[in-house]
Amino acid sequence: MRILVVTVVHHPEDARILHRQIAALRERGHRVVYAAPFAARGVTPRPYVEGVDLPRAGGRDRRAALRAARALLAERGPEADVILLHDPELLLALPGTLRRWRRAGAAPVTVWDVHEDTAAALAMKGWLPRPLRIPLRAAVRAAERLAERHLRLLLAEDAYQDRFRRLHPVVPNLATAPPGPPEPPGDDRVVYLGHLSRARGALELIETARLLAPDVVVEAIGAADPDVREALAAADRDGVLRWHGFLPNDRALDLLSGALAGLSLLHDQPNYRHSRPTKVIEYMAHGIPVVTTPTPLAAELVERHGCGLVVPYEDPASAAQAVRRLRADSELRSRTAQLGHEAVRSGLDWRDHATAFATVLEGWAKEGKAATTAAGAAARTG
C-alpha cells in the first residue's frame, strides 16, 4: 500500500505514530509518506519514510498548519491508498478535499486515529477561554459524529466506543517488551516518562523529587508545557531532579531499565478516566514497579497484575512514601517488577497487535479499491 500519515500536533517521533504504527506498516512492506512538523520540532525524518514537513499547530492559531495540511491532502492524497490522520484538527481540512477527490474519481481510504477524548481534553487547554469550552465540546461531539459518517475510525481505547454509534477497531497504546529478562530494579533512581504538564502531575513530580532527595534521584523524560517549563528547569538547575527534556523513543526507553520505580501522577481529569497511560505499560514492560494515581485504567492494571502501588491524586508525600516503601522492601520491589513484566509478555505487548493493525488498513484499502473500480464501471456504462 501507499500510505500517507499526517499530524500537525504530535511530535514526529511520537511512539504510537512512528515507533508502533509506521513500523508495523513498514514491516509489512508498505510505502509510507509521513507528514509532520519536523522543522518546528528540530527533527530529521527517519530514512525509512518519505518525510514531508508541515507547520506545527499549537495554541490558538492553527490556521497555517491547517492550510498546509489541506494543500498536502489535495496534492498527495490521490496518490495514496490510505490516508491516516492523527489529529482532530485535520478533520477541518477534509470537507472540500473529499468532494474534490470524489469528483476526480480518486477515493483514498481516509482514517482518523482517535488518540483521546477530544471534547474532555478541552478542559485542560489553558490557552482556550473558559466561556468557549462548553460550546466547543458540543462542536467536537458533532464533528465526531460527522467523521464517523464519512471516514474510517481507529480507537486508542475500548472506552472510546461509547462516543460513536458504530463499532470501530481498537488499536491500543501498548509497549514492546525488550528481548530477554529485564534488568532488576535498583534502589536509587525513579523515572517519569512522557509529556509534562500540570494535569499530568509535573508540579507534584517536582515536589516528590524534593521529598526523595538526596537518597533517590527522580529523572523526568519528556517535553513540557510552557507553564511548567521554568519550574522543571529550576528544579533541574537546583539538583532537585534531572530533566532530560524530549528524547527519541529508543533513547528514552533505555533510561527505564534498572530504575527503582516509574511514576504516573495524572490528575483526576475527564480525559484520563477512559485512557490507559502508556507510560504505565512501558514501566511494566521494562521490569520496574509502578507508582500511579488512581486513574481508573491505570489503577485497574496495577491492582489486577500486582505490579505496583496506587497513591492519591495530587499528593506528593504519598508518592514519595510509596517509593520509599519499594526502596526499603527489596522483595516487594522485585515481585511487582516481575509481575508487571510477565503481564506485558502475556497480552500487553504491541507485537501481539501490530499485525492486526496493519491487516485492518489493508482490508480497508481493498474495499476502497473495489468501490472505486465499481464506481468507474458504473460511470462508463451510464
Image: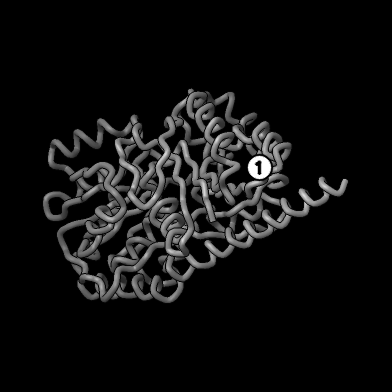
| Residue 373 visible to the viewer | yes
Q: In the rendered view, tell whether residue 125 sits above or below residue 360.
A: above
Q: Position of residue 360 (x, y in %)?
A: 59, 62
Q: In the rendered view, tell whether residue 232 sits above or below residue 247.
A: above
Q: Position of residue 342 (x, y in %)?
A: 36, 75
Residue drawn at the location 36% of the way across and 52% of the way down: 48
- Mark count: 1
Residue drawn at the location 54% of the way across and 39% of the way down: 76
| Residue 298 visible to the viewer | no
58 or 364: nearer the viewer: 364
207 or 364: nearer the viewer: 364
Residue drawn at the location 25% of the way across and 33% of the way down: 231
Residue drawn at the location 27% of the way across and 47% of the way down: 247
Q: Residue furthest front?
A: 380
| Amino acid type, residue under disc 1 in the picture | Glu
Instruction: Tell whether 187 sits left or right of 75.
Output: left
Instruction: Tell whether 140 sits left or right of 65.
Output: right
Q: In the rendered view, tell whether residue 242 sits above or below residue 336.
A: above
Q: Position of residue 301 (x, y in %)?
A: 44, 65
Dividing the picture into quadrants, the one containing residue 51 is: top left
Quadrant into which the N terminus falls: bottom right
Badge 1: few (under 14), some or many (20 or more) residues near its Cα, within 10 Å? Answer: many
Dividing the picture into quadrants, the one containing residue 158 is: bottom right
Q: Mark 1 falls on what kind of element?
A: helix
Q: Residue furthest right?
A: 382
Question: Which residue is identified by label 1?
Answer: 144
Dividing the picture into quadrants, the one containing residue 236 is: top left
Q: Position of residue 323 (x, y in %)?
A: 25, 59
364 or 243: nearer the viewer: 364
199 or 243: nearer the viewer: 243
